[in-house]
Amino acid sequence: MRPRPPTYDKFRDVQAELDKTGAAIFRDVDRVESLVIRYPYSITYIHSYAEDSPFFLGLAEGKLRGSKCRRPKCGFVYATPRSHCMVCGAPTEWIDLPTSGRVHSWTTCHFGSEAFLKETPYNLAMVEFDGVGSLLLVRLKDAVESDLYVGMPVEARFDPNPKYLVTDIWFVPKT
Amino acid sequence: MPARSKARTKSRSAPKRSAPRRPALTPTTKARKVFMVTGGVTKFAKAHPSMDFRLMVKRAYDYALKDIPNLTKDRIDGTRISYFSDHFSRQLKAASMVQDYLGMNPKGSVRIEWGGATGGECFQAAYEAVASGRMDVCLGAGYETMSRVATWKGNEFIALASDTNFDFPLGGFYTGYYALMVVRHIYEYIRRSKYAHVTDEREAQRLAIAEGARIMSLVSVKNHRNALHNPYAQYPKRLTVDDVLRSEMISYPLTREQICTMSDGAAVVVLCTEERAKEFTSKPVRVIGVGTGTDTMRLADRPFGQVPLMPKERASDYEDLQYPGIHSFRAGRAAGLEAYRMAGITDPNRELDFIELHDAYASSEIQTYEDLGLCKYGEGYDFTERGDPFLKGIDYGFEVPGAGAIPVNPSGGLIACGHPVGATGLMQGVFAFWQLQGTIAKHFGDRTLQIANARRGAIHSHAGTGSAVTVSILERGF
């Protein structure tokens, strides 16, 4: 036997109760009562980078790799790599990208999803490179909102302790 | 210079090929005519803890059936059921539980999911079931219960609909992606025109962003204000431009009032053949056009090419424009073109009386005006300021000389109604249906939002960063 959980008219009080005891009753404006429980749910994935793997292994070696369509008549160059060309469907080959480029667009995030809230505020930038047909989305560090503009020259930095995540690379204003 | 910037320079001298045009669709050759005969919506709310998804759908369904007593459950041949995220439900195969709760077994059904455009796709799936001859009467039902997790966890779930290798780990934040898009949109269309004379690049961009943010705020004021007359809306309110600009900064330059919220809610539509429609109602609404479009999942991969042209546009309008880049939604243009072609529409501003448009962000509403050809690319801000998408006869607190030209989001849109993803596109279908029936007063208990003599309207549903868009066109059928 378990005593009936406490009843609340405000949902935020329900949430507070769940954090304490794991169960509460919510009573809505029509006096309908609903039992609400705390129900944790977590998953650890076995995430394979598969055909994108050389990009992430490259970051860990301090290299920024894009890909280039192998078909000479196409030859499209991707900053965010794809193992097959989006334009013509041919396989691509890995290439080294320049480690400096320009800001194509940017923002400063004052919020983020739960996993990243503690990192706010952070800057995101789409970076464009000479001779490359697509962009790369990155974090932009060592700069605040008022420093940033479209066209700003930026250069890459690599994490000395790589985590095999896209955040192993970030960009900073070019000195 | 990057490759595309070279192309931009070159294109000034070399004329572009006009974008290829597909032959006109002839929708009547094999497809059957499809009519909407009823719909229902639950009030969208931050949380409906006393209703689970099954009960929410049931409430919307009961409302729809009550509206046309000749329609009974046995007349429904099958269903299409939509919800976006299994993470929010923590219940896989939840659509089966909706089918079950409505007592629809053993009729045919399938679950529809297409990101933010889930509801719009469900509407079109129901359309296709009838148009193809597979069903005479099809129920389209959608819902989302987003309140079962905290807001920032919810943002994480939504951001899982971005590339988890390259995009999600950077912050997992959709508002950030739309902010990147609008900063570039402002750069293309305000900095390069209105502030072309300012030589200091940073200063020019700051001024342009401030101007863009001010104009985006007009959209937020409009949608929140319209919603004051919509009892289904989650956040109706009277705001000023300053209120919007001073609300919390979420991702520069987008503030809280320029962004839709997470919601609990459900919506249903019933689509059927012409013969059945006549049995059920004296006020049917015909679906005369459907279109869909897609684009790359990653913003980084969007091409720098040519604009697929609307009938009124010429290739020479866009000689210097690299399209869509990250500033426009090619999927929205493709969906609009297909739907217009099928409906025989060549001038949407004149031939549509209103649009219910997917304004998850005030910025994307302005970007979408351009995609749907309500104005040319680059004219969205002027179009907004002129007031064309505002309703006539409502006091917004500022002058809207063009009001009534082509009202957009008369219901209040996602920004004010809320965005329970799997229901949203269907909600638009229901609001458009009531507009075209002329029954807004009956369903809203307030006739302010009724557009006089509305004959034809469009609904527009949009998935993550514009990776998929649907446009459907409805016309009064009586």
Image (tube, coloured by chain):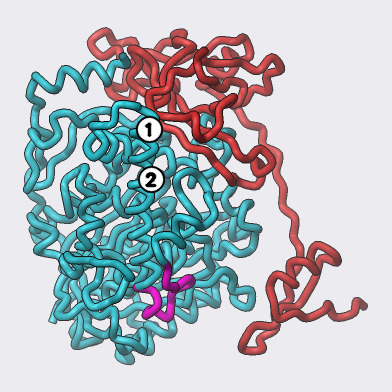
Chain colours: A red, B cyan
> Residue B422, relative to residue A14: is it above or below?
above
Q: Mark 2 highlights which residue?
A: B210
The local secondary structure at tag 1 comes to helix
Residue A30 picture location, percent across and down:
61, 89
Q: Which residues are magenta?
A: B226-239
Q: Nearer the viewer, residue B397 or B35?
A: B397
Indicate the amino acid at tag 1.
Glu
Res B203 label: 1
Q: Chain ID for label 1?
A: B
The quadrant the N terminus of chain A occupies is: bottom right
Q: Residue at x 34, y 60 (%)?
A: B219
What is the distance, in whole Å, between disc 2 and disc 1 at their CAs? 11 Å
User: With B180 as the anchor, is B131 left or right in this view?
Assistant: left
Label 2 lies in what chain? Answer: B
Q: Nearer the viewer, residue B240 or A111?
A: B240
Judged from this view, the residue extending furthest toward the bottom is: B69
- Residue B279 in the image: x percent, y percent? 21, 87
Membership of B364 in magenta stretch: no
Q: Is residue B294 visible?
A: yes
Q: Residue at x 10, y 51 (%)?
A: B25
- The amino acid type of the residue labelled 2 equals Ala
